[in-house]
Image: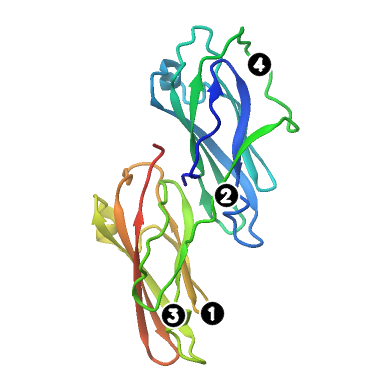
């Protein structure tokens, strides 16, 4: 999940703790229960060491405290070979609802003056963190049926998110939703798994609460590469008044660029 802004420009040679605050993204009562991994990718410029070891710029492991997730990142670079590089930093968090949220943002390095030093250990938990807030994206779309007139926020490979529709305005007084079925359809790109089984990537059964129907989808982080694919997520909901409500919206799969 792109957080919508970049980190403040970093200094070549610095070691700082950077991370994200997921407060606005989490549902009421939802908490972070673990952080899985952090990833740093060079998207502009050259970083030969990173190509050999994806963890070369990390000190310690990612951590979390409350709604904050963070990682110590060190750019020890005595030859100033990293000046001007642009990176993406992503950290994966698992929540109490079973979601996997992977916020990411870009970080550019400018020339740092002075003599860089290799840290002997990672900073303590009380160290100042350069935090970016994550947005509160709309993964439940209101609709009376048919196309929801808006699409879901972009989801990145490796994320597990609840998505769904609010069909309240399509229900009569006293009418309730009794069952719901979700399917994915590939609109552009290649996904043999979904073409063969539209229920692929679904975790558990649909959740129905009032007029809202939701389904958890887990998108693979590794092959097949789904970055850039476009899907239609549709729901077919049966009601207590023997109506059949159909709704859909698009989901775009992004990437750390």
Where is mark 1, residue-wise?
Answer: 210
Q: How far separated are the C-alphas under marks 1 and 3?
A: 12 Å
Where is mark 3, residue-wise?
Answer: 179
State which mark lies toward you, 1 or 3: 1
The residue sitting at 62% across, 38% down in the picture is 131
Q: Quadrant of residue 183?
A: bottom left
Q: How far separated are the C-alphas under marks 4 and 2?
A: 29 Å
Q: Nearer the viewer, residue 32 or 138?
A: 138
Mark sitting earlier along the chain (4/1): 4
Could you tell whether 142 is left or right of 226 in the image? Answer: right
Q: How far separated are the C-alphas under marks 1 and 2?
A: 26 Å
Q: Nearer the viewer, residue 60 or 89?
A: 89
Neighbourhood count class around disc 2 (C-alpha, 10 Å): few under 14, some 14–19, many 20 upward: some
State which mark lies toward you, 4 or 2: 4
Q: How far separated are the C-alphas under marks 2 and 3?
A: 28 Å
Where is mark 2, residue-wise?
Answer: 94
State which mark lies toward you, 3 or 4: 4
């Amino acid at each position: 999940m792109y957080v919508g802004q970049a980190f403040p420009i970093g200094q070549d040679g610095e070691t700082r703790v950077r991370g994200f605050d997921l407060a606005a993204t989490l549902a009421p009562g939802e908490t972070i229960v673990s952080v899985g991994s952090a990833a740093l990718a060079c998207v502009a410029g050259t970083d030969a060491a990173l190509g050999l070891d994806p963890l070369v710029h990390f000190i310690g492991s990612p951590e979390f405290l409350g709604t904050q997730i963070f990682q110590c990142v060190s750019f020890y670079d005595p030859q100033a070979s990293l000046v001007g590089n642009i990176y993406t930093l992503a950290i994966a968090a698992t929540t109490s609802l079973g979601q996997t949220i992977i916020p990411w943002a870009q970080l550019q390095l400018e020339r740092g003056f002075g003599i860089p030093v290799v840290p002997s250990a990672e900073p303590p938990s009380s160290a100042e963190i350069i935090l970016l807030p994550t947005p509160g994206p709309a993964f439940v779309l209101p609709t009376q049926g048919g196309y929801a007139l808006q699409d879901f926020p972009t989801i990145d490979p490796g994320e597990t998110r609840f998505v769904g529709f609010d069909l309240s305005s399509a229900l009569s007084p006293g009418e309730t939703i009794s069952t719901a079925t979700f399917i994915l359809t590939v609109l552009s790109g290649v996904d043999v798994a979904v073409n063969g089984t539209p229920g692929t990537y679904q975790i558990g059964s649909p959740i129905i609460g009032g007029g809202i129907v939701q389904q958890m989808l887990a998108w693979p982080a590794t092959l097949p590469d789904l970055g850039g694919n476009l899907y239609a997520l549709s729901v077919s909901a049966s009601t207590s008044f023997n109506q059949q409500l159909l709704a859909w919206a698009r989901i775009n799969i992004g990437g750390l660029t």
